[in-house]
Amino acid sequence: MPGPDNHQLRSATISVLVDNESGVLARVIGLFSGRGYNIDSLTVAPVDDARGQSRINVVTSGTEMVIEQIKAQLERLVPVHRVADLTREGAHVAREMALVKVLGTGDARVESLRIADSFRARVVDTTIESFVFELTGATDKLDAFIELMRPLGLAEVSRTGVAAIARGSRTI
Amino acid sequence: MSAEAMQSGAEVLLRALKDQGVDVVFGYPGGAVLPIYDAIFNQNAIRHILVRHEQGAVHAAEGYARSTGKVGVVLVTSGPGATNAVTGLLDALMDSVPVVCLTGQVPTHLIGNDAFQEADTTGITRPATKHNYLVKRSADLARVVHEAFYVARSGRPGPVLIDLPKDILIGRAPYTPPVTAHATYRPRTEPDPVQLRRAAAMLKAAKRPVVYVGGGVVNAGPDASAALTRFVRETGFPCTNTLMGLGTFPASDPQFLGMLGMHGTYEANLAMHGADVLLAIGARFDDRVTGRLAAFCPDARKIHIDIDPSSINKTVPVDVAIVGDAGRAIAGLAAAWAEDAAPVDRAALATWWRQIDEWRAKDCLRFTQDMTPGAIIKPQYAIRRLHEFTRAQAKDVFITTEVGQHQMWAAQHFGFERPNRWMTSGGLGTMGYGLPAAMGVQVAHPDALVIDIAGEASVLMNIQEMGTLAQYRLPVKVFILNNQYMGMIRQWQELLHGSRYSESYSNALPDFVKLADAFHATGLRAETVDQLDDVIREMLASPRAVIADIAVDPKENCFPMIPSGAAHNEMILGPEHEDEARGITDEGLVLV
Ligand SMILES: Cc1cc2nc3c(=O)[nH]c(=O)nc-3n(C[C@H](O)[C@H](O)[C@H](O)COP(=O)(O)OP(=O)(O)OC[C@H]3O[C@@H](n4cnc5c(N)ncnc54)[C@H](O)[C@@H]3O)c2cc1C
Ligand SMILES: Cc1ncc(C[n+]2csc(CCOP(=O)(O)OP(=O)(O)O)c2C)c(N)n1
Ligand SMILES: [Mg+2]
């Protein structure tokens, strides 16, 4: 057992493989809200149509004891196949995508495009007074980009939440 | 598909129930489930008990389940039928009772339309069940029913609900036989032998051990209790039970310390506080048991056996975690204990028992009953007398309770020698549980003596089930400790809120003797101590349902008590022991 009397908070990226049945997302979300666990990010999509399975990625935070409890609670849900604590089980890659709308003209517009370029964001829509940038990366990179856009006419943000997977040959 | 394989959904449902070994269903009809009632009408394999309120159906199924080890089955209609069942479902979830609840639903094409008696039943009951299903295709029906039974009884048992749209019940459906495995839900039952050896070594080295046993050992079946009893006797260790675990270790055994926790005994709680090794089996470190967590078993290394990994390290970190069925784990532990060559520290154990005997000598459950004729009855005395009379009976005795002081006095003063004989609402603390639960027990054990030890306030919450007792001639005995108060509330108000008895007086009570009469039962009353034995005798001799209204001391409080937020060694012992009620902190006041 990992040091349970550790009161430090840690972040955990947890992937859950579930049967793709109605209500399964409500079960997972209800578990988090009902028991007062944090959800910092949540994504869900089917990943295996043949087996009818979806993958839920949750980024949460808590003490070691709480995170162990979250995993145990998830594991005992009936439609859950597997729970992987990607943060604990080894190196992993976590990415999310954001669509960022920036309104502006003149210098601010030019500056937003310059910054987007340095972040390797793509322009996916443009009008004379607006851009929609598409940016993929780690959460903090997206956060930084959005902060930089704020004074330059940031108007709207849509983010996917985190998708995560273990590095190397390990699978869930 | 053959014609036989394509019966109506309702017929398929009943066939699946039969193949699951169901012999009785507790239910209440309504529009959405009429096809099921029609199918019930045409068969004899399954008996239907018509309750008077859907909550009663679930508690009855709980009583049935907990007294037999089988899955209890409930059948209710959509909308209000389903919502009335919710309290019972949550009760079963909190106390790990296997129940399958069938609810009617509006036809699939009307779902989401605010149709008549439509409720989002799976949505409402998701946090009140272990799992639930909405059957949307006839092809899934039989599989879902079998799966529901598997989930309800496997691992940590609990309630499972199946929501059945009316078109699914009417339409043709194929039948598939029961399943014994599941693709995703496969709880671990076999304990890890390495952990068992570690646990055995830790126990061998113990100087001040305590075995703390909970309801999980009841769930594991009577053999687990027998194995526990053998193991505890083999080790010579002291053993305490939670409220839910009573009966797993014989109350009359000298190694039994009584119940622990908020209203546990002085010796059990102080032994927990002083222990150097704690063996927890099928117990979930509930806040009623631990008291202030920071001060819980401060010196003990802890071993925890539980079938549900989420029960382990939930609130109390443990040193050895053993996931598995209690029965198998106890057997494995006993074997590991026998194989471990290390000797037991007999001298340390003897010192430990001397200490425990000193605590025992306090006689913390002591009370004084004035025996002069006309004297008021002490509730503890009433339970002791009831226990003595029932012990002399040839019949098997089952006790249920409502919730409150009477429940705690029953736990403290009625000795349980065997598992499955004690049915109480522990986790949810549902007033109104005891009468319907007793009804379910009596249905399962027609020849047994089934007694609901009740409070006058709680019993009114499901009093309508007296009608069910009459209809099926179920001779349940309702033994009311009538203190004219919501005593448990009154006690907290006295101790924590300056004796301001806000709304806790049981005003305008019915005449329980007449009430019994109105429900075709026998009503008896004892007002003074000299009348008590006769009333108990008459109650036990009656072949009918009985309400015995026992007037008890309205001022009596239930001690010992660990106030909210206090530690095991900060118990209040009560007036018999003339100690000071310790101050309760603000932190404690917010706790329930
Ligand atoms: C007014 C009131 C006062 C109360 N005061 C007290 C008190 O003083 N003392 C007290 O003890 N309780 C008291 N309670 C009850 C308390 O609230 C809890 O319900 C109770 O303590 C829980 O008992 P338990 O730990 O045995 O767990 P249960 O709720 O019985 O849970 C069983 C545990 O065993 C596990 N399990 C299930 N099946 C198996 C298996 N086959 N093998 C292994 N493990 C299994 C489960 O996963 C779970 O962890 C009170 C309740 C009320 C209403
Ligand atoms: C449904 C429900 N409502 C409220 C409570 C809170 N409560 C706990 S004990 C109690 C009083 C019970 O009174 P009674 O049945 O007379 O038992 P006594 O404590 O007097 O023995 C109340 C109101 C509860 N446990 N359940
Ligand atoms: Mg009362």
Image (cartoon, grey):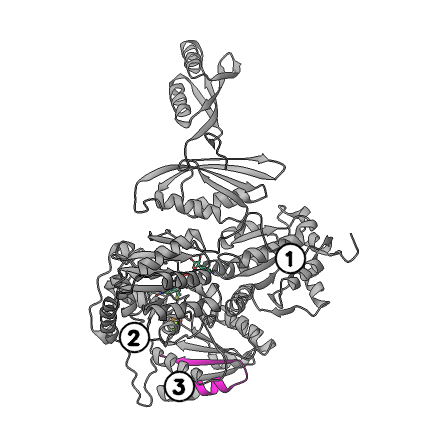
* C-alpha distance separating marks 3 and 2: 20 Å
* C-alpha distance separating marks 1 and 2: 50 Å
Please indicate whether residue B317 sits to the left or right of residue B548 in the image.
left
Q: Amino acid at mark 1?
A: Pro
Decide which of tag 1 and tag 2 comes sooner along the chain: 1
Q: Give the residue pinned by disc 2.
A: B365
Residue B226 drawn at (x, y percent): 44, 70
**Quarter of the image holding residue B554?**
bottom left
Q: At 64% across and 47% down in the image, what residue appears?
A: B111
Q: At 52% across and 85% down in the image, what residue appears?
A: B542
The subunit carrying tag 2 is: B
The answer to whether marks 3 and 2 sit on the same chain is yes
Please indicate whether residue B372 sits to the left or right of residue B308 in the image.
left
Q: Give the residue pinned by disc 3.
A: B532
The subunit carrying tag 3 is: B
* C-alpha distance separating marks 3 and 1: 52 Å
The answer to whether marks 3 and 1 sit on the same chain is yes
**Quarter of the image holding residue B36?**
bottom right
Residue B68 drawn at (x, y percent): 53, 69
Point out the stretch of residues depicted in magenta. Answer: B536-552
Residue B556 drawn at (x, y percent): 31, 75
Instruction: Say if mark 1 contacts mark 2, CB within 8 Å.
Output: no
Q: Nearer the viewer, mark 3 or mark 2?
A: 2
Q: Is residue B550 shown in magenta?
A: yes
Residue B352 drawn at (x, y percent): 24, 68
Whether A127 is drawn above or below B258: the answer is above
Asked which secondary structure carries label 2, the reply is: loop
**Quarter of the image holding residue B505?**
bottom left
Q: Give the residue pinned by disc 1.
A: B178
The answer to whether marks 1 and 2 sit on the same chain is yes
Mark 1, other Cα within 10 Å: few <14 / some 14–19 / many ≥20: some
